[in-house]
Amino acid sequence: MMIKQNKAKPLLAHASWMAGLVLLSFTVLEAPLSGGAIADDAPSAARPSDDDLRRSDWIAAGRAKFISVCAYCHGSKGNAGKVKSFTERQNWDPQFIHDTIVNGRTRGANVMPPWGGSIPDDEIWRIVAYIKSLSLDFKGPIEAPAAK
Ligand code: HEC
């Protein structure tokens, strides 16, 4: 009995130590990907044209993503939550919307989580296209160009 217990304990300790190491290496490996690469390098370089942001296929893809990830806090049209409704905006800067999604924002108890590490940048721009399509001054969608 004694011997069995003594053998089991170090094994368990070893297992949890290994699990900790695996978790730690995940954190370390992911940190530069989520924080650095996407938040700092991509945004300004990858900004699409205003016409791209009006593409109906981008708006549709962005809408699907918005509904699955963002509507929980913002409502399906950005008309719920802690900020002025997305349907009442004019001249809303796409880069500002993009960067807010990437970096998140905290104002007192209102926390907008950052998405730069979990949503690829091209998908974030499609979400921006959807948000822009809700604005008061949206000029209407542009049909997607035929397949290249
Ligand atoms: C956990 C709740 C939550 C989720 C999920 C969330 N947001 Fe937010 N969002 C907030 C809060 C709270 C604010 C306001 C922060 C503040 O007061 O500065 C905000 C602010 C914003 C703003 C800026 C609004 C303004 O007036 O400047 C945008 C744009 C935005 N969110 C888009 C998104 C998008 C797109 C998603 C999905 C990828 C998303 N949010 C997911 C809570 C959330």
Image: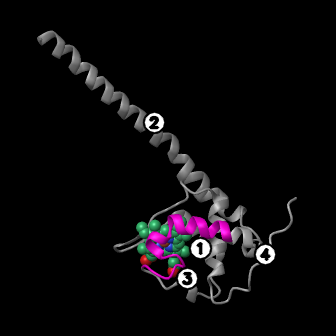
Query: Which disc number belongs to residue 97?
Result: 1
Q: Which residue is at the front of the view, 77 or 107?
A: 77
In the displayed orientation, state which residue is furthest to the left. 2
Is ligand 1 closer than 8 angstroms to the Cβ of mark 3?
yes
For the question of whether residue 69 can be seen, the reply is yes
Is ligand 1 closer than 8 angstroms to the Cβ of mark 1?
yes
Q: Which residue is at the front of the view, 7 or 37?
A: 7
Q: Residue beneath label 2, please?
A: 25
Q: Amino acid at mark 4?
A: Asp
Look at the numbered disc 4 and give the secondary structure of its residue. loop
Which label's residue is closer to the chain start, 1 or 3? Answer: 3
Which quarter of the rendered picture does the N terminus lie within? Answer: top left
Task: Indicate the quadrant where residue 4 lies.
Answer: top left
Q: Decide whether residue 79 is among the magenta residues.
A: yes
Q: Amino acid at mark 2?
A: Ser
Indicate left or right for 68 with 17 as reference: right
Measure how far apart labels 1 and 3 are at the Cα level.
Answer: 11 Å
Look at the numbered disc 1 and give the secondary structure of its residue. helix
x 74%, y 84%: residue: 140
Measure how far apart labels 1 and 2 are at the Cα level.
Answer: 32 Å
Query: Which disc number belongs to residue 86?
Result: 3
Which label's residue is closer to the chain start, 3 or 2? Answer: 2
Q: Residue beneath label 4, please?
A: 51
Bin the neighbour count of mark 2 within 10 Å (Cα to Cα): few under 14, some 14-19, many 20 and up. few
Extent of the magenta region? 60-81
